[in-house]
């Protein structure tokens, strides 16, 4: 009878030890280092050994795991990632550290407490949209959100773009931020040097990462009208129907300078370009041509040309922009832009699938004070831009 009680006691102790080890292993871990012989890598991504036996990597289920107390092993099964498939010997396990080994590969983990992380993140005043300083002719926008996500958007000088999502964790004791995912620019640990309302300075590997916020937020006027809002046949007319008036106005203008603001997807921030329309008017041939240029810090590129005369744009009374269809006159108002104040007729309409709003200066045919364009691009991304007149060069 005593022997039976002893076996039960040993069994209960064993179950308790196994459960305690399971509790130590289960949860979120940060894979900080991988050693394979002389090769060392710092992957820095999260791995969650869930209590139900599922294994997640960066929030995605990639397999299963199981603890074997008899021989201090963890088995992982994954058809997605071969590095997490097989038997792993437990070399070290504490409440904060875990070390595993498979052959000549060693994995080093640090425990992550998500509840504490969210609390720590809330103590750091860094949320918002920050433009990062860089020596490249590109826009780097870092959008940091609570409790723990960020979006890095890059607009390249050539016009291409990229976006990266990730997670951030703040350590108040070390005054450091860990960025998980994203680009190599951010990924890893950065020391927080200073954070103010409109500027932060982080230091990573001896280099500073400087972010700045715009002091004023540019308002976004969304174009909410739909095709059903327009009559089948519009009786509204453009204020620029007189071709002679158009010739006489533009023949005295050398170029038109505009500021273009493009909304960065999934943010409330903009990138900015200068647009220049060089004007050439041939009064004898009754012909107008505009060479449209985009100007950046390092490059000037012609992206289009507009011509009116002969048979070109003969019936387009919205020249040098595209004729809308359908369209309607909304109102008449005086608008203030960088180039001054102008009385305009405002039209709304469609250019293909894109929604467009024109501010047409009544007494300056061919010159727009402002244009808003909104479209849905690839992957259902909103493409939104504002063009405002900066200068009329005589």
Image: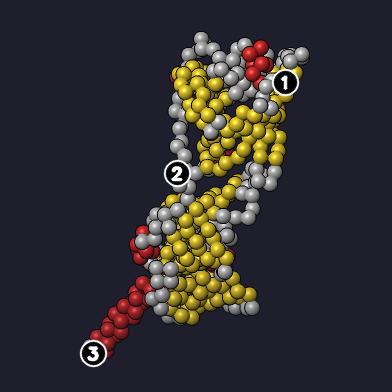
Crowd tier of the residue under label 3, counting other residues whose Cα lies within 10 Å: few below 14, some 14–19, many 20 or above: few
- Is 65 situated above or below 326? below
Q: Which residue reaches farthest front? A: 394
| Residue at image coords 55%, 63% | 208
Q: Nearer the viewer, residue 196 or 222?
A: 196
Type of colouring = secondary structure
Looking at the image, residue 55 sits to the left or right of residue 83; the answer is: left
Mark before the other along the chain sequence, 3 or 1: 3
Q: Tag 1's secondary structure? A: strand
| Residue at image coords 64%, 18% | 249
Instruction: Please give the residue where the numbered disc 2 appears in the rendered image.
Output: 216
How far separated are the C-alphas under marks 3 and 1? 111 Å
x, y (%) of residue 209? Answer: 54, 60
- Is 324 situated above or below 149? above
Looking at the image, residue 52 sits to the left or right of residue 274; the answer is: left
Q: Is residue 376 visible?
A: no
| Residue at image coords 45%, 18% | 331
Query: For residue 2, which numbered disc appears in the image?
Result: 3
How far separated are the C-alphas under marks 1 and 2? 39 Å
Q: Which residue reaches farthest bottom? A: 2
Quadrant (top left/top right/bottom left/bottom right) for the C terminus: top right
x, y (%) of residue 196? Answer: 43, 58
Q: Is residue 161 visible?
A: yes
How far separated are the C-alphas under marks 3 and 2? 80 Å
x, y (%) of residue 352? Answer: 58, 25
Instruction: Please give the residue where the numbered disc 1 appears in the rendered image.
Output: 281
Count of marks placed on residues: 3
Quadrant (top left/top right/bottom left/bottom right) for the N terminus: bottom left
Crowd tier of the residue under label 1, counting other residues whose Cα lies within 10 Å: few below 14, some 14–19, many 20 or above: many
Q: Tag 3's secondary structure? A: helix
| Residue at image coords 55%, 76% | 106
Mark before the other along the chain sequence, 1 or 2: 2
């Amino acid at each position: 009878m005593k022997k039976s009680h002893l076996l039960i006691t040993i069994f209960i102790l064993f179950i308790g030890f196994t459960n305690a080890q399971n509790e130590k292993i289960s949860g979120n871990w940060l894979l900080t280092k991988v050693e394979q012989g002389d090769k060392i890598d710092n992957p820095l991504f999260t791995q969650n050994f869930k209590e139900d036996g599922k294994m997640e990597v960066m929030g995605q289920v990639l397999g299963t795991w199981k603890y074997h107390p008899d021989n201090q092993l963890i088995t992982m099964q994954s058809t997605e990632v071969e590095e997490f498939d097989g038997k792993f010997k437990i070399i070290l396990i504490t409440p904060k550290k875990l070390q595993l080994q498979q052959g000549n590969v060693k994995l080093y983990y640090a425990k992550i407490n998500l509840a504490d992380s969210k609390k720590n993140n809330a103590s750091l005043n860094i949320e918002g949209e920050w433009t990062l300083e860089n020596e490249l002719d590109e826009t780097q926008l870092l959008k940091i959100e609570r409790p723990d996500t960020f979006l890095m958007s890059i607009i390249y000088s050539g016009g291409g773009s990229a976006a990266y999502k990730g997670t951030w964790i703040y350590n108040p004791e070390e005054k450091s931020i860990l960025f998980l995912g994203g680009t190599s620019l951010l990924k890893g640990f950065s020391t927080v040097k200073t954070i103010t309302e409109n500027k932060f300075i982080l230091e990573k590997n001896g280099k500073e990462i400087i972010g700045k916020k715009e002091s004023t937020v540019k308002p976004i006027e969304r174009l909410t009208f739909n095709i059903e809002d327009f009559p089948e046949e519009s009786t509204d007319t453009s204020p620029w129907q007189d071709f002679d008036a158009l010739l006489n106005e533009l023949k005295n203008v050398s170029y038109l300078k505009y500021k273009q603001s493009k909304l960065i997807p999934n943010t409330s921030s903009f990138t900015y370009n200068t647009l220049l329309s060089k004007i050439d008017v041939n009064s004898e041939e009754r012909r107008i041509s505009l060479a449209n240029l985009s100007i950046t810090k390092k490059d000037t590129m012609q992206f289009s040309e507009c011509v009116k005369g002969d048979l070109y744009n003969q019936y387009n009374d919205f020249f040098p922009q595209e004729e809308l269809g359908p369209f309607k006159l909304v109102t008449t108002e005086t608008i203030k832009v960088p180039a001054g104040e102008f009385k305009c007729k405002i039209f709304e309409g469609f250019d293909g699938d894109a929604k467009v709003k024109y501010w047409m200066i009544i007494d300056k045919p061919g010159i727009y004070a402002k244009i808003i364009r909104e479209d849905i691009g690839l992957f259902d991304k909103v493409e939104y831009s504002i063009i405002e007149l900066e200068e009329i060069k005589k």
